[in-house]
Amino acid sequence: MSDLIAEPPPAHATGTQSTARIAVASFMGTAIEFYDFYIYGTAAALVFSGAFFPELSDVAGTLAALSTFAVAFVARPLGSALFGHFGDRVGRKSMLIASLLTMGLATFAIGLLPGYSSIGVLAPLLLVLLRFAQGLGLGGEWGGAALIATEHAPPGKRGLFGAFPQLGPSIGYIAASGIFLALTLTMSESTFESWGWRVPFLISIVLVGVGLWVRLQIAETPAFARVMDQQERAKVPLFVLLRQSWLPVLLGALAMAIAYSLFYTATTFSLTYATADERGFSRPEAIGATLVGAAFMALGTWVSARLSDRFGRRPTLIAAVVMSVLFAPAMFPLIDTGAYAGLLLAICGALWCMGAVYGPMGAFLPELFPATTRYSGSALAYSLGGVIGGAAAPLLAARLAADYGAGAVGLYLMGVAVVSLLAVLALPETRDRDLVAQ
C-alpha cells in the first residue's frame, strides 16, 4: 500500500485531492454498505426464521428467511438503474452519498422492527420492504465507488485503485461476522434471539455518519468533469446503454456470477448447513470459520487486482474462474468430514476463489463502458451478476442439499463457474483503455 500513498496526485486532480483520500473514500463506503448488507444475511440464517416466521416449520421458516434475503438482489438492478442514471447525469459523488443514506437508514430501521409476536404479519412485510431498500442502496453504491477509484487512478494502476472498493465486502463481512460472533459468545441463546441480534443493525447508524463525512471530502472525477465540460451527458443514460452496450452488460454480469455464488453459498447457506445436527458445528465455530475465510477473500482480492495490472484483466480472471471450477466439488465433502479443519478449508478455499475473481472487477467492469454511461453500465452489470449468481444461491443450495445431497451444490457451483468462464473469454482486454478520453 506504500506505493499508493507515495504516488503523487494525477495531473488532472484538483485542489487538495489526493490518491490516499480517494482510496479511503471508495473503500470505507463499500465496507460500511456491505457490513449493513451482510448483517442481514447472518441474521436471516440464524434468527429471522423464529423472529418473523414462527408459525412455519423449521425447514419452511429457514427457506422463508432466506427468501427475504434474496429480495435485495431483485432491488439491486433497480438501484443501479436509478443511481446510475443520476450518476451519469449529475455526478458520481452525489450518488455515493445518496446510496449510503438509503442503505444506512434501512439497516437502522430493521434493528428497530418489531417481531411477529408484536405486530403479526406486518413484521415480515416491513422486513421485506426494508430489505428491498437495502438492495436499492447497494445497487447504486458499488458503481459510484468503483468509478471514484478508477477514474482518479494514475496510469497503469487502475487495478490497484479498483481493489479498494473491492476490499469493502471483505472488511464489511469481517466486521459483521465479528460482531455476531461476539454477541453469540457473550449472550445466552434466548437473549440473542430476543434482542441481541438487533445490536449490529442499530450501531450501523454511527458507521454511516463516518462514511458520509469521508465522502463529503472528495472531488468529482476527471472523467465526469470532462463529460460536463463538453456537454456530452445522455438524456437517458440507461436507454443509450441498452442500445449500444447491452452485450458488455450481459457478459459482465455473467462473469461476476461465480463470485456471488461462491460468496453467498459459503457465508449464508454454509452457516445453516454446518450447524445442522448432522454436522454438529456450533454457531461460534461456523461464524469463526467464515471470519477466517473473509480474510482469505481480502487477500485473494488484493493479489488478483494487483496481478491484473501486470498481466491484464482477462488472463487473471480466467485463472481465477478455472480455480473456482476445480474447487467447487470439494467444498461440501470437506464440511461433511465433521472436522473443523475441513470446515475451515472449505470456507477459506471458496472465499479465496471468490476474491480472486472479484479483485479485478473493480477496474474491469468500468473499463467496459464509455464515460457517458459508465456508472449505469458498470453498476448494472455488477448488480445483475448478483441476481444471477447470488440472489437464489442460499435458497437453491438449501433445496439441492435437501433433495439430492450436498454434492449437488458443488455441481451447481461448477456450472455457474463454467458460465462465468465463457463470459470472460467473450470479453475484450481493457487494461490499457483511457477512461478520461473514452
Image: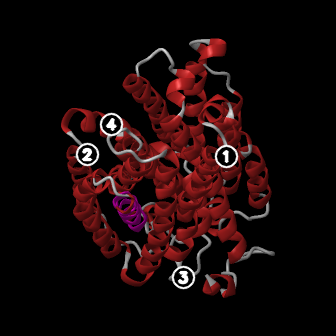
Q: Nearer the viewer, mark 1 or mark 3?
A: 1
Q: Residues within 10 Å of mark 3 (few under 14, many from 20)?
A: some
Query: Label 3 near label 1: C-beta < 8 Å?
Result: no
Q: Is residue 242 visible?
A: no
N-term mark: 3 or 4: 3
The residue range painted magenta reads: 342-356
Expressed as whole percent of the image width and height from the top left, the position of residue 115 reads 63, 21
Disc sitting over residue 398 in the figure: 4
N-term mark: 2 or 3: 3
Three-letter code, disc 2: Val
Query: What is the residue that sits farthest to the top in this orientation?
Result: 120
Give the CA separation, mark 3 to mark 4. Answer: 45 Å
| Left or right of residue 250, residue 41 in this image | right
N-term mark: 4 or 1: 1
Which type of secondary structure does the marked residue at label 1 adopt? helix
| Left or right of residue 358, residue 178 in this image | right
Disc sitting over residue 155 in the figure: 3
Three-letter code, disc 1: Thr
Dividing the picture into quadrants, the one containing residue 309 is bottom left
Expressed as whole percent of the image width and height from the top left, the position of residue 380 reads 46, 48
Disc sitting over residue 186 in the figure: 1
Give the CA separation, mark 1 to mark 3. Answer: 49 Å
Q: Is residue 287 visible?
A: yes
Q: Is residue 279 above or below residue 56?
A: below
